Image (cartoon, grey):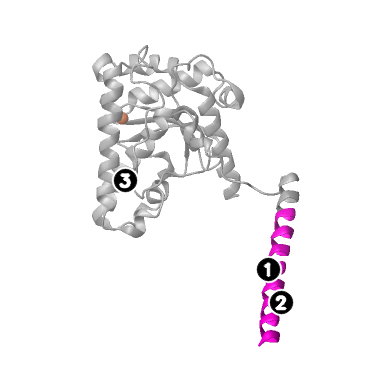
Amino acid sequence: MFSINSKVRELIMKFWQQKVGYFLVGITLFILLYAFKLVPIAIQPSIAKQSPVTHLATVSSSLAELSAAPAQLPPLPYADNALSKVIDAQTMKLHHDKHHATYVENLNDALKYYPDLQKRSVEELLRDQDRLPEKIRTPVRNNGGGHLNHTMFWQIMSPNGGGQPTGAIAAEINKTFGSFDAFKKQFNEAGSDRFGSGWVWLVRNGQGQLEIMTTPNQDSPIMNDSYPIMGNDVWEHAYYLKYQNRRAEYLNNWWNIVNWAEVNKRSLVSLQQQSSRG
Ligand SMILES: [Fe+2]
């Protein structure tokens, strides 16, 4: 009896000694790896504490695409009245809180019986719309496009924007269009000529070149294999309260709030996408 008890005790002791040994080895290894910065300790929680501006800029400037599970209205990255030198506060509020919110709501509504489609990004749904069930093809095109276009729109404007383009996009605009003024003129004319509702864009096309294009309604350039670097909303709801029917005046003033830093980030993403497709 005595020998069995002591054997069991011995085994238990051995077991714990081994455990403690493993634990100490583990701790030592972890300290060494951490010292040499080989261990990602955790995803920095500070991203949640960043201001909406920085957070949204990060999202828009990465290859991350918009989630449709469910689609969510992003907050405006500035106050309603922050762009009032060009767009009045009431227009901004209605545009974001009502129009954009409705696109998000309607997109979620269109996808509510399609859990598999909710797993795809808004961009994927738009690129691949021919394969969507016919019943939801038009609502997804209009509301997914509306959500994607407006998400970009808020980010490429800033109360500190305007002036001459900066960074790589400045050089590329000069190279492609001759000068910033020539580019602006062409962009404004395209926006003025867009019949009815739609958007005017600077895109990187499938051949990797900058191009000005317009789209009707809420269509996105990604449906035409082009990446939207910047775009202006020429729906009347974007300017009517201040400019009424004077779209050309709105198009002209809009340059005073263009966020060139964000436009540069988007241009970089467009180049990355281009090279990742080969
Ligand atoms: Fe709009």
Residue located at (31% from left, 45% from top): 141
Whole-percent x and y of residue 107? 29, 46
Residue type for callout 3: Arg
**Is 40 above or below relative to 17?**
above
* Classed neighbour count for the residue bearing mark 2: other residues with Cα under 10 Å, few (<14), some (14–19), many (≥20): few
Nearer mark to the viewer, of 3 and 1: 1
**Tag 2 and tag 1, C-beta contact below 8 Å:** no
Distance (Cα) linking label 3 and label 1: 63 Å
Residue type for callout 2: Glu
Q: Is mark 3 within 8 Å of ligand 1?
A: no
In the image, farthest residue toward the front: 2
Q: Quadrant of the N terminus?
A: bottom right
Mark 1: which secondary structure? helix
Residue located at (55% from left, 38% from top): 269
- Mark closest to the chain's N terminus, 2 or 1: 2
Distance (Cα) linking label 3 and label 2: 72 Å
* Magenta stretch bounds: 1-29
Nearer mark to the viewer, of 3 and 2: 2
Residue wearing tag 3: 141
Whole-percent x and y of residue 232? 39, 26
Rendered image: mark on residue 16 = 1
Residue wearing tag 2: 10
